[in-house]
Amino acid sequence: MEQLAWARALQGGGAISAAVSALLADLTRDDVRTKAMAMIGASIGLMFALSLVLGPFLNHAGGLTLIFAVMAALAVAGVWIVLFWTPPEPGAHATPQAAPGQLRGLLLSADLMRLNLGVFVLYAVQISTWVGLPFLLVQAGLPVSDHGWLYLPVVLMSFVVMGVTLFPMERKGRLRGLFLFSIALVMVVQMGFAHQSLGDVNWLTLGIWLFLFFCGFNVLEASQPSQASRLAPTAVRATVLGVYNTLQSLGIFAGGAVGGLLSKKIGVTGVFAINAALLAVWLLVAWGMRVAAVHRSPTATPTGSQPEGSQT
């Protein structure tokens, strides 16, 4: 366990989420950034579901050794993709580096603090949900080895919903309403999970609640980093996204550690109820949010400090 913890700390030291978000923000036009962020989020969600389907087969074929070997091979493939396939990042930004006082004021701005709180709550709720949900699915008669077959279609269907809601609503300037609705939807889902845990558990009902969870989660996961990148000046965008992704990682830690502790002390019903309360607080805080305007390019030709062909 100690070696595993040190290995995970080393892996997390790469801070890959912040680097990917900042690079993506530099390589995309403002009017397609949310879609690009959504594609990354979709790939993460899809691989999450696929891993739960493929994991039992890999475990049967070679145990944990094979699973970690596949992860290592994927990491090497990721390095190759960045080196030889990913477009080169733009040159040094013409904007001068922000002074420490300016950066501190930016990070403490109400709009960014709302987003940082939001990503912390979102991922804490997501991970703590997975503390209790597998238990409910087993109670409903679905073996652990079959959970991936429920997650995969649910995740794929939720991507379709995101595609027909998030992008059109953003183009029409209605992102704020969709954002607040998504928070409320995830909150209602947590209440639904809590209600299910009190009575007869049905895997089909849990699947419907899970589908609604991903519908709300996908919108929030894609729109928040896009908003953070728009609110930050170009010169400090990577720093702002680094802070944002740090709060995301802390939310993952809190969701796993605190969610596991609470499930022992008060049961999974209590975990879902506390999740709903956290989301209610986030909804109140986010109510006064300011949605950064999308700057649309008249053509697909790159502008500003970015070199020819650097934008996607």
Image: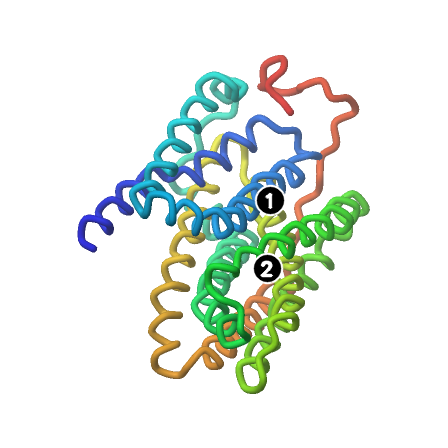
Q: Which residue is mark 2?
A: 150
For the point 51% across and 50% down, the residue is 53
As drawn, which residue projects farthest toward the right?
A: 172
Q: Is residue 102 visible?
A: no
For the point 66% across and 33% down, the residue is 30
Frontmost residue, 33 versus 199: 199
In the image, taking residue 270 as reference, residue 31 lies left or right, namely right
Frontmost residue, 51 versus 218: 51
Q: Secondary structure at mark 2?
A: helix
Identity, as a three-letter code, of the amino acid under mark 1: Ala
For the point 38% across and 27% down, the residue is 76
Is residue 276 positioned above or below 255 on the image? below
Percent x, y of residue 97? 44, 29
Q: Nearer the viewer, mark 2 or mark 1?
A: 2
Is residue 258 positioned above or below 225 on the image? below
Q: Which mark is residue 42?
A: 1
Q: Is residue 150 visible?
A: yes
In the image, taking residue 146 as reference, residue 174 lies left or right, namely right
Quadrant occupied by the N terminus: bottom left
Is residue 3 positioned above or below 186 on the image? above
Percent x, y of residue 277? 53, 76
Percent x, y of residue 117? 49, 59
Is residue 282 positioned above or below 71 on the image? below
- Binning the other alpha carbons within 10 Å of mark 1 as few (below 14), some (14 to 19) or many (20 upward) gives many
In the image, taking residue 58 as reference, residue 23 lies left or right, namely right
Q: Which image quadrant for residue 216?
A: bottom right
Q: CA distance from mark 2 to mark 1?
A: 17 Å
